[in-house]
Image: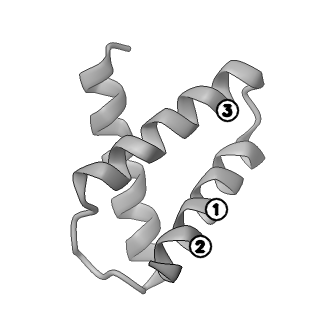
Amino acid sequence: MDVEDRFLGAEWLLRKAMAADGTEGDVDPDLSTVDQFMNRITEACEQASIDTRLATVAKDLFAENEDG
């Protein structure tokens, strides 16, 4: 995947996660949040491709954004 495809994939994953969470509704995540998520997914995938790592990245990112 190129960078644009990874960005679009990260944006889609965040929208789905936020809709499932119920905290954001149909609001699109801001570009910096998508970029952070994409970068963290890339880092996690470079370490190992385990589904629990993606869940951890998403959970940590949402926790950080709730505080700010």
Q: Where is residue 53 in the image (x, y as percent from the top left)?
A: 73, 44
**Residue sitting at 76 percent across and 23 percent down?**
47
Residue at 36%, 54% in the rendered image: 33
Residue 18: x and y in percent read 41, 71
Q: In which quarter of the image is residue 3?
A: top left
**Do the numbered discs 2 and 3 sit on residues whose CB atoms are within 8 Å?**
no
Whole-Å distance between the Cαs marked 1 and 2?
A: 5 Å
Label 1 residue SS: helix
First of labels 2, 3 by sequence position: 3
Q: Is residue 22 above or below residue 56?
A: below
Q: Please tell me whether mark 3 sits on a helix, a strand or a loop.
A: helix
Q: Classify the position of the C terminus by image quarter.
A: bottom left
- How far apart are the two marked residues, 1 and 3, measured between alpha carbons? 13 Å
Quarter residue 22 falls in: bottom left
Residue 35 image-quadrant placement: top left
Q: Distance between the residues labelled 2 and 3?
A: 18 Å
The single residue placed furthest to the top in the displayed view is 2
The answer to whether marks 1 and 2 mark residues whose Cβ atoms lie closer than 8 Å is yes
- Type of the residue with mark 2: Ala
Task: Give coordinates of residue 65: x percent, y percent.
Answer: 47, 72
**Type of the residue with mark 3:** Ala
What colouring style does the render use?
Answer: one colour
Left/right of residue 26 with respect to residue 45 in the rendered view: left
**Residue located beneath label 3 in the image:** 44
Residue at image point 56% right, 36% down: 41
Q: What element carries label 2?
A: helix
Residue on which the image places disc 2? 63
Q: Identify which amino acid the numbered label 1 is placed on.
A: Asp
Residue 40 is left or right of residue 50, and the answer is: left
* Residue placed under numbered mark 1 in the picture: 60
- Can you say which quadrant of the picture contains the N terminus? top left
